[in-house]
Amino acid sequence: MKALRSSFIIGLALGLLSAIPAAAQNRTFSDPNVEYTFEVPDERWKMVGKPSATSPNVNYVFVTAKEGDLEVRKTTARADTPTADIIRAEEDKLQFMPGYVAGKDENFSGFLKGSVFNFEFVRSGRNMAGRFYFLRSGDTVYILRFTGYTNNLRSLRSQTDSIARTFQIKKS
């Protein structure tokens, strides 16, 4: 009986250990039309907007756009411009969304340092949330705009943080 229990525990442990590498597999986003790269932590994130020579914007959705949407945008601001000023300029555009409620700013760091801005709004009668990462590289600020249903975006936070943490400029 004791040998059967031990072999069961060992088998269970081996099964769990073999599942970890499969769950931890990331895909790397990289495209010759943009100067950055990042890791996509889950295969349910699908690219729906590919960058081109005329439009460097990237769009991903998590299952559907309302469940999770990522837009990568790029803007320029002098290196001595505070990130808070860049966030306020973006917030000026957001405040006209129905049901808009500003959240708090947080400092954030990964390969690039910056800030995160959280907010809530209403779309088609449903509570939605936004989590925008402002990542700075010299005079360039990359804005990772995540939006989705409030509950979904909250549960995707570890993935949105992971994408932002792994966002980096390609090595020349």
Image: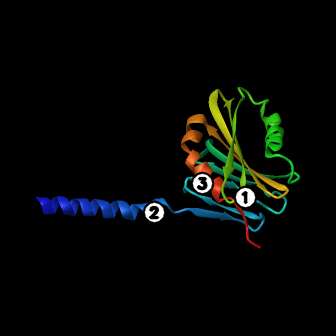
Mark 2 is surrounded, within 10 Å at the Cα level, by few (under 14), some (14 to 19) or many (20 or more) other residues, namely few
| Residue 22 position in % (x across, y down) | 45, 63
Mark 3 is surrounded, within 10 Å at the Cα level, by few (under 14), some (14 to 19) or many (20 or more) other residues, namely some
Q: Which residue is mark 1?
A: 50
- Foreground residue among 107 and 96: 107
| Residue 131 position in % (x across, y down) | 67, 42
Q: Which residue is mark 2?
A: 22
Q: Residue at x 64, y 34 (%)?
A: 128
Question: Image quadrant of residue 90?
Answer: top right
What type is the residue that disc 3 sits on?
Ser
Q: CA distance from mark 2 to mark 1?
A: 26 Å
Disc number lying in front (3 or 2)? 3
Q: Which residue is mark 3?
A: 162
Pointers 3 and 2 in contact (C-beta within 8 Å): no
Q: Residue at x 60, y 45 (%)?
A: 64
Residue 157 bears which disc, if any? Answer: none
- Foreground residue among 105 and 14: 105
Q: CA distance from mark 3 to mark 2?
A: 17 Å
What type is the residue that disc 1 sits on?
Lys
Q: Is residue 172 above or below residue 117?
A: below
Q: Residue at x 73, y 68 (%)?
A: 170
**SS category of the residue bearing label 3:** helix
**SS category of the residue bearing label 2:** helix
Q: Residue at x 77, y 64 (%)?
A: 35
**SS category of the residue bearing label 1:** loop
Q: Is 83 left, or right, of 155 in this rendering? A: right
